[in-house]
């Protein structure tokens, strides 16, 4: 089967939903959205990338990790350690030739997973994410907002502590870093585009999605040789 399918996956903490794209055979991608509001702004864009990958013959899954999307875990009870565990157990279930692709803070999820490679778009540390959340909170804070309220998201103090020390994967294996030309930080390649995660409403960039899907498919092919 190659069309969009609704599926679930089990991990040691329960069962969560996920979307499947493309073929079931061959290399498969686990896609990770960024945390919190940026997930809403980039979801359609990431889904477009996964549809493009399916056209390249590459299958993928887009899981709801605990405390994200339609998860049975509410945001206020989410822990990064649980999200990492769920991701790692899903990767183990999918088997070898499983690759991770992520946007922004989505790169924080795969650190414990056994992956054939990691492709990261504008990877972000937990500290960077918290700084951005703080800026949003200061800009929108009401008199009744608490120290754990971030622009409509109530985060546990444990989750905040998890994020303070969180960083993308550092270890052996292929890692490809992609950034936009407006980003001064180092990357394997940079593309000219506007950052969708900065926009006030969800949006898409089909041209960039096609470019990135081509980049991912060529990168996976090079890893498979």
Image: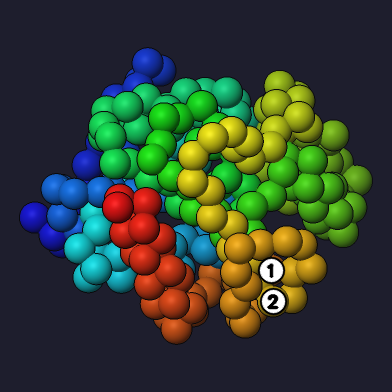
Percent across and percent down for residue 214 are 38, 72
Q: Residues within 10 Å of mark 2 (few under 14, many from 20)?
A: some
Q: Which of the 4 quarters of the picture holds residue 176?
A: bottom right
What residue is at 14 percent from the left and 48 percent from the top?
25
- Of 60 and 19, nearer the camera is 60
Can residue 60 be seen in this snapshot? Answer: no
What residue is at 28 percent from the left and 35 percent from the top?
96
- 7 up-or-down from 199: above or below: above
- Of 73 and 60, nearer the camera is 60
Mark 1 and mark 2 lie on one chain; the one further toward the N terminus is 2
Q: In what quadrant of the picture does the N terminus appear? A: bottom left
Q: Residue furthest left?
A: 1
- 172 up-or-down from 27: above or below: above
The tag on residue 159 is none
- 209 up-or-down from 104: above or below: below
What residue is at 37 percent from the left and 25 percent from the top?
89
- Of 150 and 98, nearer the camera is 98
Tell me the residue that label 1 is attached to.
Answer: 198
| CB under 8 Å between discs 1 and 2 | no
Between disc 1 and disc 2, the foreground one is 2
What residue is at 85 percent from the left and 34 percent from the top?
147
Q: Which of the 4 quarters of the picture holds residue 199?
A: bottom right
Instruction: Tell whether 63 sits left or right of 142.
Output: left
SS label for mark 1: helix
Instruction: Tell whether 141 sits left or right of 57.
Output: right
Distance from the alpha carbon under mark 1 to that under mark 2: 15 Å
SS label for mark 2: loop
Percent across and percent down for residue 191 are 59, 77
Q: Which of the 4 quarters of the picture holds residue 148?
A: top right
Percent across and percent down for residue 83 are 51, 30
The tag on residue 181 is 2
Can residue 43 be seen in this snapshot? Answer: yes
């Amino acid at each position: 089967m190659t069309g969009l399918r609704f599926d679930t996956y089990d991990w040691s903490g329960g069962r969560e939903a996920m979307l499947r794209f493309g073929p079931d055979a061959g290399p498969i991608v686990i896609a990770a959205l960024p945390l919190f509001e940026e997930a809403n702004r980039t979801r359609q864009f990431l889904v477009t990338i996964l549809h493009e990958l399916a056209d390249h013959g590459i299958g993928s899954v887009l899981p709801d990790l605990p405390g994200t999307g339609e998860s049975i875990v509410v945001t206020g009870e989410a822990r990064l350690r649980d999200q990492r565990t769920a991701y790692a157990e899903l990767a183990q279930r999918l088997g070898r030739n499983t690759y991770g692709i992520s946007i922004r803070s989505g790169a924080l999820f795969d650190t414990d997973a056994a992956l054939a490679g990691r492709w990261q778009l504008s990877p972000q540390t937990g500290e960077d994410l918290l700084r951005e959340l703080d800026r949003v909170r200061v800009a929108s804070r009401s008199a009744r907002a608490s120290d754990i309220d971030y622009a409509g998201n109530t985060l546990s103090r444990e989750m905040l502590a998890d994020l303070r020390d969180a960083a993308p994967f550092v270890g052996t294996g292929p890692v490809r870093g992609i950034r936009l030309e407006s980003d001064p930080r180092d990357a394997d390649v940079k593309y000219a585009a506007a950052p969708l995660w900065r926009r006030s409403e969800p949006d898409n960039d089909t041209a960039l999605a096609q470019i990135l899907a081509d980049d991912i498919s060529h990168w996976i092919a090079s890893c498979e040789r």
